Image (spheres, rainbow, N blue to C red):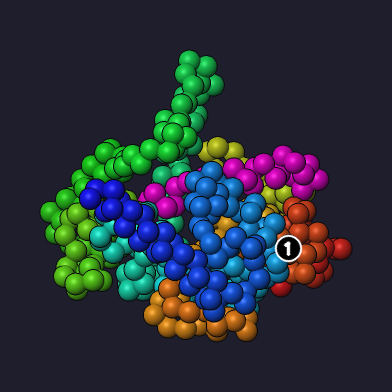
Amino acid sequence: MYIFIIYILFVAIAASQVFKRIKAFRSPLREVPGPWYAPLTTLHLQYLFSTGNIWKYVEKGHKCYGPIMRVGPRQVWISDKDAMKQILVKQDLPKVAMYAEISRDRASPGLFGEIRLKRFLSPAFTVAYVDNLEVHFQKIVRDLLNKYQSKVFFAELTFYKTVYIKKLIRFFVMDIKFDWPAEMIAAIEAVIYRRQQTSGTERQDLLQHLLEQGKRPDTGVTMNTRDITDQMAEILLAGSETTSGTLACLFLELARNPVVYNKLLESLPSASLADDIVSSKTVRTESQYEYLEACIKENLRLHPIASEMGRRTGTEWVNLMGYDLPPHTVVSASYRALHLNEEYWPQAQRFWPERFLAKDKRGDAPAAE
C-alpha cells in the first residue's frame, strides 16, 4: 500500500514537472532569444545571484543574444535605452518581490516596494528640499573631520582585523535572519520620542515629514513609532553602503588614472581642515567644481551600485521591443550593460570624465547624451 502511494506521488511530481516544461516551451516568451535551458529552470539564476556573479552572466548574454533576452521560464533582461524608459518611466511597472527583502518586516509596505509610499516621500528628496538641510549635513561632516583629526586610526587598525561573519554563513547556504543593528534602531527611536514630546517643530526634515503626515500606504492609518522607525532605518541602510561603495569606486578610478587625478586637483580650490564645508549646491553651480562633478557622473556610469533593476508585468500583457510579455513576467533593466554599451558610450570601459563637460571643454571626448 505504501509503495503504491509513493509511486502515485512520484508520478504526480513527474507529471507536474513535465507539464511545467511543456508550458514553459509553449510560453509566448519562446520567441525571445536566450540560452536553450532558459525555459527549463532558474537554478542557474539562483546560483549567480547568491555568488554575486549575475552581472557577468547578463553582460555576456546581451553580447550574445542582443538587447532583450530570456534567461529563465519567466525571466527577461533588457539593455535597450528606450525599453528601459518604457518600463521604468512611461509604464512604471511594479517592482519584483526581491525589494521586500530590504524591509525589516516583509509584510509591511516599504519604500522600495510600495509606490504609494514612494510618492508620499518624494517631496522630501527634491534638490531644493535637500539643499535646505545642508546646514545639518555640514555639522555632521565637521564632527566626522574632527574625529579624524583627534584619533590616530592607523595605530588602532594594527590590533584587529575585520571578519565578515555574514559572508561566511552565506558560504554554507544557511538561511539565517539578521535583524537591523540594535544601536541604530535605538538611536532612531530616541530621536522619534524626543520629537514627539517636543511642542512645535524641531526642524523640517524627512523624519518630521513622517511624524506629521505619515500614513501606511496599505491601510491609510497614521504611522506608529514602529512604522516610522522602519522607514527611517530602511533609508539609512539603503543610503550607507551605496554611498560608501560609490565613493570607494571613485577613489579607485582616480588612483588608476593619474592624469585625471592631477587635473581634478588642479581644478579644485585649496582648502584646509578648518575651512567651511563646501555645500552640494556650490559643487553643482560653481564652475571651479565642474570637473569634480564630471568625475562623479562618470564614476556613476562606470560603476552603478547595482547591475539591474527588477520589474514585473503585473496582471497585464506588455509589448516590449516587439515582443508580447505575458502577466507575471520578470523584466530586469540591465542598466550596467547599457552604461557599457559602445553604441551610446564610445570607449565605454574608459574612465573619461570629459564626456560630461561642455563642448568647448570636452576636447576629444564624446558627449554624454
Depth order, front residue of 367/164: 164
Where does residue 7 sit, x and y in percent of width and height? 33, 53
Quadrant of the snapshot with the C terminus: bottom right
Q: In the image, what residue occupies the spot 46% across and 64% down?
A: 18
Q: Is residue 236 magenta?
A: yes
Q: Main secondary structure of the magenta part?
A: helix
Where does residue 170 sit, x and y in percent of width and height? 44, 37
Is residue 286 visible from the viewing direction of this image?
no
Q: Amino acid at mark 1?
A: Cys
Q: In the image, what residue occupies the spot 44% across and 78% down?
A: 327
Q: In the image, what residue occupies the spot 50% across and 82% down?
A: 318
Looking at this view, name the residue that lies furthest to the right.
364
Is residue 168 visible from the viewing direction of this image?
yes
Depth order, front residue of 369/331: 331
Res 183 → quadrant: top left
Name the residue that disc number 1 marks.
Answer: 64
Res 134 → quadrant: bottom left
Secondary structure at badge 1 equals helix
Where does residue 272 sit, x and y in percent of width and height? 59, 38
Q: In the image, what residue occupies the spot 62% across and 77% down?
A: 31
How packed mark 1 is, by other alpha carbons closer than 10 Å (few <14, some 14-19, many 20 or more), is few
Residue range corresponding to the magenta coloring:
235-262
